[in-house]
Image (cartoon, rainbow, N blue to C red):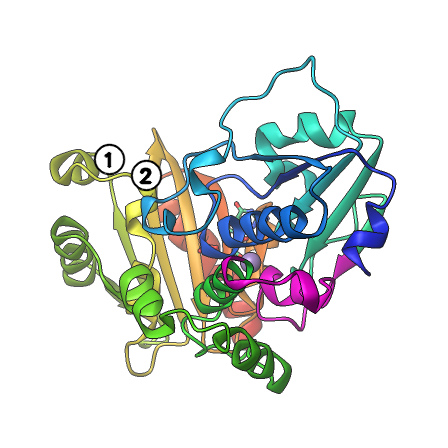
Amino acid sequence: MNLLSEIQNAKSVAIAGHIRPDGDCISSTLAVRAYLKNARDDLKITVFTQDNPPTIFSYLEGYDEMNLTYSPKEKYDVFIALDSSSLDRLGDSLWFFENADKTICVDHHETNAGFADVNLVDPKASSTCEVLYGTFDEEYINEAVAVCLFTGIVHDSGVFQYSNMSRKSFEIVGRLVEYGFDAPGIIQDTFYVKSYVQNQILGRALLESILFMDGKCIVSMVDRKMMQFYNVLPKHLDGIVNHLKNTRGVEVAIFMYEMGMQQYKVSMRSNGGVNVAKVAAVFGGGGHERAAGVEMNGTYYDIINALSREIEKQMQ
Ligand code: 5GP
Ligand code: MN
């Protein structure tokens, strides 16, 4: 797919990612914005996000111009959905999807069935940002675009650590860093540095974690009381599940936070033996083989039991 050819006749484009946006989601939407601004100064471009993006990404060009509301009076010729595996992941952006003349989807989730008019889904890619790079003409990539693409790849690969990093991914990263931005600084400031309370809550989550299935699984949970006590939001809990996974012998890590009464957001990470996207899919969620998520109802222990049953099936 060549993105510029796909939007050749468009005068207006709306861009959005998924609900509760993560690094790849924010970066991919802002990468498309910056790229289209460079290539088409006649184009009206709107970036929409249902939920506030994490402020750590405020250095990305266009961050302050992301819209949290939309006007049903405005119509867009093209809507571009990014990093979203299915329509329900779009949240309020669904309005744009339903009202645009043409829809385009660029993604890297294996479970993406191709819900738009034109789809480019590459499950082998590290990130949506990596897939996007292949749709861009080099001449319209500037430092701002490169910074966005780099950030998305860094965040969806756990700083180039996950198995979704291929030779191609590393080559793209190599080309991006040539634009001269502070690559190590971005990694440090957006991936590793956490606020003091975030580190405190991480400590609590590690302290209260439980090993089960002979040490092959680890689980921990943060309830609403704890979130209120530390005054943190769900987006501040990103990364805890990765720390749980870095426990010797663990094959699957599960982290949950309480969204409401008997309602939990579950994040799962795997070292490869268990496909956690399949586990999540049983309960209506999704993601990737080694990183997946789902919202579940029930008590903490009900949910652990339900998930363990599915994990065990794959371990046999
Ligand atoms: P995280 O655990 O970091 O929230 O998400 C890990 C991966 O699972 C991401 O690729 C994300 O898109 C996917 N994911 C997380 N939560 C959900 C969910 O509720 N539904 C679906 N379909 N995918 C999810
Ligand atoms: Mn992604």
- Check disc 1 and give the amino acid type: Arg
**Residue 112 at x, y percent in the picture:** 72, 54
Q: Nearer the viewer, residue 47 or 10?
A: 10
The residue where tag 2 is placed is: 258
Dot 2 crowding, Cα within 10 Å, few <14, some 14–19, many 20+ = many
As for residue 143 lying within the magenta part, the answer is yes
Q: Which residues are magenta?
A: 120-144
Q: Residue 271 occupies which quadrant of the picture?
A: bottom left
Residue at the (67%, 48%) spot, across then down: 36
- Look at the numbered discs 1 and 2 and tell me whether their residues touch, using CB distance below 8 Å: yes
Residue 213, percent from left and from top:
36, 72
Q: Which mark is residue 224?
A: 1
Mark 2 secondary-structure assignment: strand
Given the image, on which type of amino acid does mark 2 rest? Glu
Q: Is residue 59 left or right of residue 292?
A: left
- Nearer to the camera, 253 or 236: 236
On the image, the x and y values in percent for residue 54 come to: 36, 44
* Residue 195 point in image, percent of width and height: 17, 52
Circle 1 packing at 10 Å, graded few (<14), some (14-19), many (20+), is some
- Residue 48 seen in the figure: yes
Judge left or right: residue 185 versus residue 130: left
